[in-house]
Each structure stands twice: as C-alpha cells, then as structure tokens.
C-alpha cells in the first residue's frame, strides 16, 4: 500500500470511530500521555502533517515558519480536520509549536486547546523534571475533567496502560526483529501498524500489531532468531549493547533513517517505489513517530498515575529539543555501530530548528564510525519529491 | 568647520555617551580575554541570570552582542557561510550561525569572534534555539553547557513552574561551584544584586525618559546602549556607565533636545533590529520619524532586589521567567499596547526576523490585535538581524512608506 493509501486507511479508521460516537482529543507532539486521555474516556489521536495540503497558513504564519506547523495550520484552516473534542499543544519543545499554540487559540477560538509543557532538562540528577511534568499532567487532567465533566477513572487508566503496553511490546518486538532480519516483515508494514495505532489506539489496532508480532515470532522461532531479537530489544531499551547478538549472514546494505517529526511511511514509500531497491535495506528508523514512540517505557500501574506517566514520557529516546546533544550522539553511535548500520539517511524538516541544528552533529557522529550519510531536506508535502528520491537512490547505490 | 556643519545637518543627534560605550566594550573585551586565559570565561545568553556567574567571579561575554557587531560590520553573510559550510542551514538563527562561523575561523572575524569559553550558560527564556546553538559551540570548544530551563508561562507562573526553575538555579550554583572551585558568598551576591538593580533602574529611567516629546532617544541609540545592561549587570562599571548615560538623556529632556531634529511621528519597534542596516532608523529620522519605544530593549527591565541567597533565588526565578519572549501572545500584545499608550505612539513597525522564530511567529496575529485594541496602524517588514542576504531594502521602504502615508 502506498503512502496515500495508508493515510486514507488510517483516516477512515478514525472517522469510523467518530461516527460510532467516540470523542477524540488530538495531539501534535508524539510524546503525549495517551493513557491520560483514555482515563478520561477520550480516544487520543496523533494529528500529523499531510501531503497534498493546499496553502491556507498565509493569514497567520510567515513562509519561514516550520513546514510542519504550516501544514497543520493549513489543514485546520481548510476544514480538513475531523471534529475533535480538543487539541493538545506541547509547550517548551520548539519555538514553532510554542507559538503555533498561541496563534491557534486566536484564530480558532471555538477549538478547545490544551497545553502540556515539557521540561527540557534531562540530566538534572534529581527528581525535579519528573515532579514538574507530573504536575503538568495533573493540571491537564483537572482541566479536561472540568471542561468535559469527565473524571479521571482509575479503571480506565489501568485498561489504557495495558492497551498501550500491548502495542509497545509488540511493536518493539517487530522493530527488533527487523534489525535482526529486515526481510522478516516489511518496514512499511511495521510503520503502517504504528501509524494505525497512534491514529486510533483501539483494541483493534493494538490487536493488529499483536497479530503481526505473533506471525513474526513464529517465523523467527523457525529461523532460530528469537534470542537475537530479544538481545536487540533489551539493548535498545537499556542502552547497553554489550549483549547484542546479530546473525553472521546479515544482508547488506543496512540503513537507518534519522530525524524528528518526519512521517516514516513517507520515506518508506519513496524507497519502495525505487527500482531494484528492496524495502529490506531499511533496518531501523530513529524517527519521533516511529522508534522514539515505540521504545518508550509503559507507565507503571502502581503508585501515582501522574508520576508514572511523567516517568514514561521522560523515558522516550531523546529529541533534539531536549538537553544533552552529546548523550544523544553517544546513544546513536552505540546503536549504529552495534546494529551493523552502514548508511544513515538524515531527514530534516524544512525550517525546523531542532532538525537542522542536529543534522550536522549526526553527520559528524556517523562519519566518526565510518558510516555514510545523506541529508534530505523535506517538507510534509514532499514538494521536492523528485530531487529527494534521486538523492536517496544515489546514496543507496553508493552503499552497494 | 565643514565637518561640524555636516554633523549639524544630520537628522539625528549622536549621543556623547557612545564614546564611553566604546571604552567599556574595549575593557570588557580585555577582561574576557583575561578570563579565558585564566580558564574562567562563560558565554551567556541574553536572558541568562548573569548576576550568578558574576557573583561567582567568572568572566562573562554575550555572543548575541558579538552577532550584532558582526552584523553591523556587514560581514554577516561571509561569517554565516563558514557555519553553512559546516552543515548548518541558512534557515537557522543568524546569531547562532555567525557565532559558529566565528568560532570555527576566529582569524577571519577579528571584530566579533569571542575568546574561547570554559562554560556555556544558556537560558531558554528567549528561545529554544540557544540550547542547540550552545550545544554546537560545546562540540567545537569542549566547554560544557549548563541549561537553565525556564518553561514558558502565560500570565501567571504556577508554583510547580517556580519550584522547577528554582531548582535549576540552585543546580546552576552547585555546577559553577564544583567546576570552578568557587563558594557562593551572600555578601558578594548582595553586592552584585545591588549593582545589577542599580544598572537596571538607571536603564529603566532612560527608557521612560522617552515618553517625553521630543524623545531623547531613538531606536538605534537604545540598541547600542543596551549592551552593558545585558551582559554586565552586576558590575560597577556597568552602573557607572548608566549614570553617565542617564545624565545625558535627562539633560536632553530638560533642554527639550530630541534624538532626531524634527520629530513628527512616533512609532513602536517590535523585534531585534537589522544590525547591518541601522541606517534604516536614520533614514526615517530624516522624515521626522522617531521610535521612542521598542519591545527588544524593554526586555531588560526586570529589577532584582535581594537581601540573601534565598531571596535572590526567588528574584531570579521570577525575573528571568517573566521575560517578554517567555510569555504567551496575550502578554506580548498587552506589552505592545501598553507601550503605545504610555509613549503616546502613532503606529508600529514589526520586523519579522526570518531566523528568529520565537520572536517573529505570531506577529501576523498580534499586528491585528494591537491595531484593534489601540486604534493605531502597523506594518510588518521582513528581513534578518544579521544576514543581509534576506533583507530587501526596496520592499521594506515601500511598506514603511505605506504606513507613513496613513500617518502624515
């Protein structure tokens, strides 16, 4: 299925939910506490930029605004959004999203806009970041309860934790399995399942991921790869790669895709449409809507739920908006070198400060390992698709 | 005689204090070099609580000021190119680009490259970019980065936000103490806080003097004279400079001397100035346009009064969390409307700075809101503070002309 087809499918899934009476709260930054919305009886849905979005931002945003936020704004201005009960903006992540939240409140005063402010600090060696984010989550919960007269229900929260845990555990297995054997399941299938769950986190979408993981597990068992897969999964979760066991007969080239809020499916579709390039060259992505969401710890069901959700959110792999460039580069180097990656595609959203600041450091870090890189500036509309494809194709040919 | 006459014919009046400013800048440069050689130099962002490193006897420099100097020398594009050759996009903050460029090739930027830092102190109350910029400099120099995270606030700073920032300030002190083997002494911090408060108080007096007609200062005057209050608050020479400066400003007020010779229109300026084209203000001065107020230089008006470490921390948390750029759109619009009212302004010019997203995104909305609430017209012009490649003088002139036609 091509990219447009996947988008269509997930939109249909969401629309069906709305038609059946589910109320949706959209969120834009991927590290949002899905469990919190579900505890209040809402379905959270990750709102993403879409290709083919006509202009519409010009009344409120300059052309030098990040292409991602321009796209989101245009979708809303053009009436492309489904009816949402509310929309969550992140605070303190990047300047563009920070200001977009303000602009949105003025331009769309009927929208119920919430804000969750994140700490940037990551290495305080005390509990200040967890305390801050826990309180932000508690206030968000109070605000949702007051706005909709829907309390936070522990039972719903516990069910949500289990649902998200099911999804994460299955998708972590699929990601890890592909590192060991990228042919075991196409990358496009994995990211389609992830997209489907993040768009509509339901029992059905979690089950689809779980079913795919079961099929892959059976295949892996036949191929005697289960230990290898578990070694990769636990290494990624712990950051300690000393126990990684990869098969000796890995097919090459093996590439990874780095970047931020870039749609994994968009990159995968482009690569799939290139002649003579198999999907299996993509071993892994390090993107916000893929790897970084999948490899986040699940909140504990015991203790204070807001603290547990804060700990979960803060356990996600680092984003360029966080403190700690050197830690992120060390983590990436550990991952690339121990998972036998030979090439790295570095995606940069046009006019995105975090992506564009991080890219040179990623390039240098990969170069230190002898890993080739290609930088791909893009926007959600893939308006320069021909050039992007040529760049990626040329890069892949150099790895062969 | 000829020179005197030429000076007399200029539409604006040069401040005598500018000569003193050059001396201070020279002294500041020498002190920074010495601090770097002694292993004690911190680079600080413009919104950083500089009182703390100063009280702990570190030398401080201010890379945004260096960026302004590079811009004013009109070498922004060349220095940016150095950073762009290293892989940094032309779409990124031009202060950051020229900072990275001048750090990479300091010999090519004799005026504007800074001595090697031993510490990089970033506070994200002015934007999120500063952390990534300082991370890049850290990769180049090996100096560690300390981030003081001040999550943006709307109108009120909530207790958990205060507590989080306060803990960040405490960790900052612990970090400097352990890295530089320093001890935080209350007597010293009181002294620094008093000097800081004195300098800021004098700066506020100078700004408020511009409510007078004619305004004793124009935008360019304030952009040039703001440097010490940004980078050297808490030092004696900073307070001394502003005593002299305020005396000159108040003398102008007393004698009815304006910053420009024939004040006709009073405008508000929003955003960082185009350092490469400060003559923009002088050209407008020749048409009788003065800018008695701006949102940029009014950002350094947080006045701290501290009697001990605990009260200083509280003051730091409040002052540095509530800076203009760390507040929501409502607060920004409120501030602009207040300035228009207090300074009796006829209109406003918003400079949409392509590489400063935090300051600029939202201006299209705030322009409408400010006009709606004050009844005065405004115009948005687009360009960049340092990178003159994206500054289209003819287009800007056309837009400003349209505004002036409405006002004349």
Image (tube, rainbow, N blue to C red):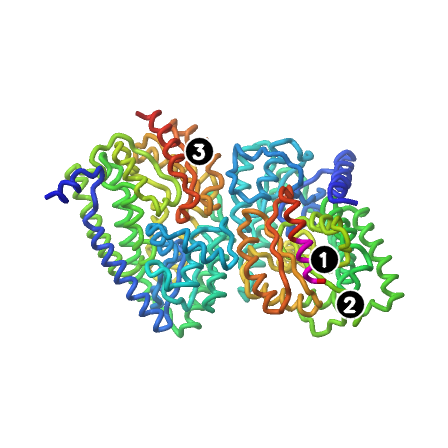
Which one is in front, A135 or A253? A253
Q: Callout 1: residue from which chain?
A: A
Query: Considering only vertical position in the picture, is A31 above or below B408?
Result: below
Can you say which quadrant of the picture contains the C terminus of chain A? bottom right
Q: Is residue A223 visible?
A: yes
Residue with the mark numbered 1: A301
Residue with the mark numbered 3: B367
Magenta stretch, overall SS: helix
Q: Is mark 2 on a helix, strand or loop?
A: loop
Query: Alpha carbon of mark 3 to alpha carbon of mark 2: how far?
Result: 59 Å
Q: Nearer the viewer, mark 3 or mark 1?
A: 3
Which one is in front, A330 or B315? A330
Residue with the mark numbered 2: A250
Rendered location of residue B6, percent (x, y): 16, 41
Rendered location of residue B317, percent (x, y): 43, 55
Start-end of magenta stretch: A392-399
Q: Is residue A296 visible?
A: no
Residues marked 2 and 1 touching at CB (< 8 Å): no
Badge 1, how many Cα within 10 Å: few under 14, some, many 20+?
A: some
């Amino acid at each position: 299925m091509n990219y447009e087809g996947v988008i269509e499918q997930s939109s249909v899934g969401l629309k069906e939910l709305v038609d059946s009476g589910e109320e949706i709260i959209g969120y834009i930054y991927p590290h949002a506490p899905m469990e919190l919305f579900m505890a209040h009886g809402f379905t959270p849905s990750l709102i993403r930029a879409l290709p083919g979005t006509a202009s519409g931002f010009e009344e409120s945003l300059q052309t030098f605004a990040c292409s991602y936020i321009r796209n989101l704004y245009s979708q809303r201005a053009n009436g492309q959004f489904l009816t949402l009960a509310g929309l969550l903006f992140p605070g303190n992540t990047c300047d563009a999203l920070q200001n977009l939240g303000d602009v949105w409140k003025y331009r769309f005063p009927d929208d119920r806009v919430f804000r969750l402010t994140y700490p940037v600090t990551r290495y305080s060696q005390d509990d200040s970041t967890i305390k801050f984010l826990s309180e932000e989550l508690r206030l968000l919960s109070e605000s949702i309860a007051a706005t909709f007269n829907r309390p936070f229900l522990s039972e719903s929260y516990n069910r949500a934790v289990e649902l998200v845990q099911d999804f994460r555990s299955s998708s972590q297995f699929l990601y890890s399995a592909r590192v060991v054997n990228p042919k075991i399941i196409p990358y496009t299938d994995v990211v389609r399942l992830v997209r489907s769950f993040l768009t509509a986190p339901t029992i059905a979408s979690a089950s689809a991921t779980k079913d795919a993981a079961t099929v892959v597990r059976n295949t892996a068992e036949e191929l005697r790869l289960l230990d290898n897969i578990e070694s990769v999964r636990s290494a990624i979760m712990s950051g300690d790669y000393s126990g990684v066991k990869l098969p000796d007969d890995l097919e090459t080239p093996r590439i990874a895709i780095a970047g931020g809020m870039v749609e994994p499916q968009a990159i995968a579709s482009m690569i799939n449409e290139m002649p003579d390039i198999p999907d299996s060259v993509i071993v892994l992505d390090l993107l916000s809507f893929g790897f970084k969401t999948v490899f986040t710890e699940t909140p504990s069901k015991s203790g204070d739920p807001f603290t547990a959700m804060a700990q979960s959110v803060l356990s996600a792999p680092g984003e360029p908006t966080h403190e700690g460039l050197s830690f992120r580069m060390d983590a990436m180097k550990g991952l690339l070198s121990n998972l036998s990656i030979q090439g790295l595609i570095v995606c940069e959203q046009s006019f995105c400060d975090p992506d564009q600041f991080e890219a040179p450091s990623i390039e240098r870090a990969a170069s230190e390992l002898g890993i080739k890189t290609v930088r791909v500036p893009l926007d959600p509309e893939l308006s320069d698709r021909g050039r992007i494809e040529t760049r990626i194709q040329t890069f892949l040919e150099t790895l062969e | 005689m000829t020179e005197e006459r030429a000076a007399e014919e200029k539409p604006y009046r040069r401040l005598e204090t500018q000569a003193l400013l050059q001396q201070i800048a020279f002294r500041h440069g020498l002190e920074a070099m010495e601090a770097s050689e002694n292993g004690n130099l911190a680079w600080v962002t413009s919104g950083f609580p500089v009182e703390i490193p100063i009280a702990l006897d570190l030398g401080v420099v201010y890379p945004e000021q260096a960026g302004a100097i590079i811009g004013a020398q009109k070498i922004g594009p060349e220095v940016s190119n150095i950073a762009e050759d290293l892989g940094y996009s032309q779409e990124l903050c031009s202060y950051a680009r020229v900072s990275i460029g001048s750090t990479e090739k300091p010999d090519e930027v004799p005026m504007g490259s800074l001595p090697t830092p031993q510490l990089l102190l970033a506070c994200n109350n002015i934007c999120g970019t500063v952390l990534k910029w300082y991370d890049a400099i850290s990769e180049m120099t090996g100096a560690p980065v300390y981030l003081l995270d001040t999550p943006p606030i709307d109108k009120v700073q909530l207790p958990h936000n205060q507590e989080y920032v306060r803990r960040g300030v405490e960790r900052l002190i612990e970090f400097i103490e352990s890295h530089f083997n320093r001890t935080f002494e209350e007597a010293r911090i009181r002294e620094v806080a008093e000097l800081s408060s004195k300098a800021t108080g004098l700066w506020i007096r100078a700004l408020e003097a511009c409510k007078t007609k004619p305004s004793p200062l124009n935008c360019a005057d304030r952009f040039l004279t703001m440097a010490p209050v940004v980078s050297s608050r808490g030092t004696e020479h900073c307070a001394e400079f502003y005593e002299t400066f305020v005396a000159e400003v108040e003398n102008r007020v007393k004698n009815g001397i304006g910053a420009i010779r024939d004040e006709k229109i009073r405008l508000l300026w929003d955003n960082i100035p185009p350092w490469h084209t400060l003559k923009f203000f002088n050209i407008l001065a020749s048409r009788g346009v003065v800018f008695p107020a701006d949102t940029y230089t009014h950002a350094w008006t947080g006045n701290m009064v501290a009697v001990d470490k605990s009260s200083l921390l509280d003051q730091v948390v409040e002052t540095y969390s509530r800076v203009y750029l760390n507040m929501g759109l409502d607060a920004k619009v409120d501030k602009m409307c207040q300035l228009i009212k207090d300074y009796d302004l006829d209109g406003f010019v918003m400079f949409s700075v392509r590489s400063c997203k935090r300051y600029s995104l939202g201006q299209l909305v705030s322009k409408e809101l400010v006009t709606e609430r004050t009844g005065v017209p405004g115009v948005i012009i687009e360009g960049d503070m340092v990178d003159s490649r994206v500054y289209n003088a003819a287009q800007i002139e056309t837009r400003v002309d349209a505004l002036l036609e409405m006002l004349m």
